[in-house]
Image (cartoon, rainbow, N blue to C red):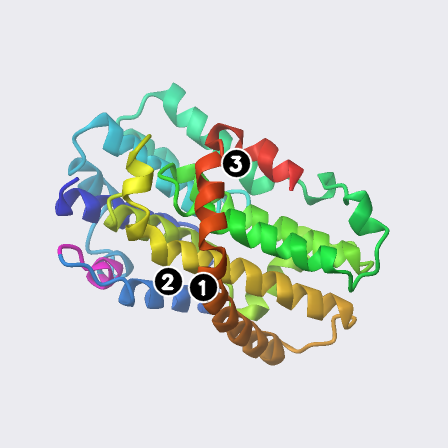
Amino acid sequence: MTPTEQESILTLALMAAFADGAKHDNERAELKRLAERLPHADVQPSALYQRVLLKQVTSGQAAAALQSPELRQLAYEMAVCVCDADGAQSDAEKAFLAGLRRELKLEEKSAAAVDSAAEALAIEPLADISMPAALAQSSPMDAQVEKMVLNYAILNGALELLPESLATMAIVPLQMKMVYRVGKSYGHELGRGHIKELLAAAGVGLTSQVLEGYARKLLGGLLGKVGGGMLKSVGKQATSSVMSFATTWALGKLAKQYYAGGRRLSAIELRSMFGSLTEQARSLHSRYAGDIQQKAGSVNVSQLLPLIRGQ
């Protein structure tokens, strides 16, 4: 993939992030920070961010640089997943994606398959989760809760090592499922809105998190690889894997303290605590790096939705 093609795909992903026009200020700030902290020898995400924000480039111009069907399909997958990161698509996002399908000259059948898979991950109902008997019958402070959080962190760290775009899309739904289960173990029945509020208070940007995973895979040359390509590119994805593991672990630990304490922590306290827990989680990653790579080798991406339902 050439630098021009990488720029075009990342440009379309950034456009997808802003497509609904309703991003909160904190999410916009996260997207800006993301662009600034992804320096690359051939591609400058911060410059792309400015061009998108100032509308100096159109989706048609970005799409025109992608000549192969595979790259056009990849660009569309990333755009769909970024739009779906914070839930079901808005009307504005649907309109953006409809126009993008035409500009990328995608076949309806292949585009529909992407739409369906991403939507299923985005809106999978939380209430479908049944608590494992061992966890439901134990004390809320039982080590089972800690083990559950660690398992989610390992799985999400593993997903960032996979080349398929839907693997990154699954990370946010898995985090939401984890928070739901942690809350339920402390007697709180949570809706999707409650969970998104907790993530926002902690400073976890849903759209920016998904976009960052894609950007690192794209710039690291991992997206689109198959078979042995995954293991050869593991080193390039180490940073994303660490971040996904750390964010998930910290979020699980934060949810545990928040719901165990009766949801009394303020937004300032939540954000401060999440930052401290994230740093702690980064130092833990090396201890579980082997487990993460082992999990990456065993995950069947075609079964992502059943996998999420079973977590």
Q: Nearer the viewer, residue 210 or 227?
A: 227
Question: The residue under label 3 is which amino acid type?
Answer: Glu
Q: For mark 2, does the 10 Å Cα neighbourhood hold few (<14), some (14 to 19), or many (20 or more) residues?
A: many
Find out whether the residues at labels 3 and 2 contact each other: C-beta distance under 8 Å: no
Count every numbered label the image shows and give the total: 3
Q: Is residue 26 above or below residue 228?
A: below
Q: Secondary structure at mark 1?
A: helix
Residue at left offset 76%, top offset 41%: 130
Residue at left offset 24%, top offset 63%: 46
Q: Is residue 18 left or right of residue 173?
A: left
Question: The residue under label 2 is which amino acid type?
Answer: Leu
Q: Is there any visible trace of residue 160 in the rendered image? A: yes
> Which callout, 3 or 2, points at the residue further toward the start of the chain?
2
In this figure, which residue is indicated by the disc labeled 3?
A: 119
In this figure, which residue is indicated by the disc labeled 1?
A: 27
Find out whether the residues at labels 2 and 1 contact each other: C-beta distance under 8 Å: yes
Residue at left offset 28%, top offset 67%: 36
Residue 166, horizontal then vertical, whole percent: 44, 38
> Which callout, 1 or 3, points at the residue further toward the start of the chain?
1
Q: Is residue 300 above or below residue 255?
A: above
Q: Is there any visible trace of residue 215 in the rendered image? A: no
Marks 1/3: CA–CA distance: 21 Å
Residue 68 figure quarter: top left
In the rendered image, residue 214 lying in the magenta stretch gets the answer no
Q: For mark 1, does the 10 Å Cα neighbourhood hold few (<14), some (14 to 19), or many (20 or more) residues?
A: many
Q: Is residue 142 above or below residue 168?
A: below
The magenta stretch is: 42-50
Q: Which mark is residue 286?
A: none
Question: The residue under label 1 is which amino acid type?
Answer: Glu
Q: For mark 3, does the 10 Å Cα neighbourhood hold few (<14), some (14 to 19), or many (20 or more) residues?
A: some
Marks 2/1: CA–CA distance: 6 Å
In this figure, which residue is indicated by the disc labeled 2?
A: 31
